[in-house]
Image: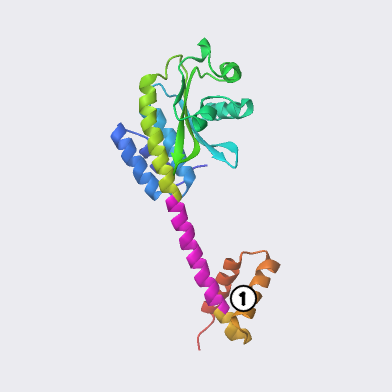
Amino acid sequence: MTTQNEPRIEQAAQGAPGAVFDGLARLVYGAETYAEVYQAICDAALRLVDGCDHASLTLAERGDLVTAAATDETARVIDHIEREEGEGPCVDAISEEAAQLDTDLTDGTPWPALRERVLAETPVRSTAGFRIMVDDRKVGALNLFGDAPGSLDERSVDQAAVLAAFASVALRSAADHEQARTLREGLRSNREIGKAVGLMMAFHKVDDEEAFDILRRASQEMNVKLSEVARQVVEHHNQRPRP
């Protein structure tokens, strides 16, 4: 299933590094959902980081790690393995300040359980993880994977560090955007509820508390949000024929 935003996401992740970051910045400020931002960051990693064949973005939510976005199924599989085994560059990157890098999984690794399964279940032979911070909070990690031994190296780390820093800024911006949207929706809902209360007061000849209680009971009986009940009351009033 595709969305109208997917072409913009693809465009943001193409071209020279400067163009990619410019496209990502525009996407962040215009995105309607976090998912768009997450996916664009992963897609950009394939074009900005030498040796990166797969990428994912993992977030820590209520003590659990979840894959917020990934370039493909291989990246998702490795994220799942890390969660099951409790070890890997993503797990360590979230808790450690330094980037986590294993250039060649075929030649030993700090994560033996991960190594065994990755070599058996995926084509990946090189992996790296980078912590993402938002307002001094460790919110997740950017995870990169290469199919050839040594494909991810120190140069890759330098490139990915820049993208991870951008990701931190992008998530902060997305959070601000979401808070502003939520505030606008809350204000709009409050205005609708206020209008509906006024209509109920006039129609039923009751005070504001009784009018609000009428709306609240209707919301519970209909199993519909109070703001939606208010919107329908106001809409019905506006559609009445005028004398």
Q: Residue furthest bottom?
A: 243
Residue at point 61% right, 27% down?
86
Callout 1: SS: helix
Residue placed most toward the observer, 85 or 201: 85
Q: Name the residue that disc number 1 marks.
A: 212
Is residue 10 in view? no
Q: Which residues are magenta?
A: 176-197
Residue at point 68% right, 72% down?
217
Residue placed most toward the observer, 194 or 64: 64
Residue placed most toward the observer, 226 or 232: 226
Is residue 45 in view? yes
Q: Residue furthest right?
A: 221
Relative image position of residue 8 (x, y in whole percent): 39, 43
Q: Majority secondary structure of the magenta segment? A: helix
Q: Amino acid at mark 1?
A: Phe
On screen, 186 above or below 16? below
Dot 1 alpha-carbon crowd within 10 angstroms: few under 14, some 14 to 19, many 20 or more: many
On screen, 116 above or below 35? above
Relative image position of residue 152 (x, y in whole percent): 42, 20
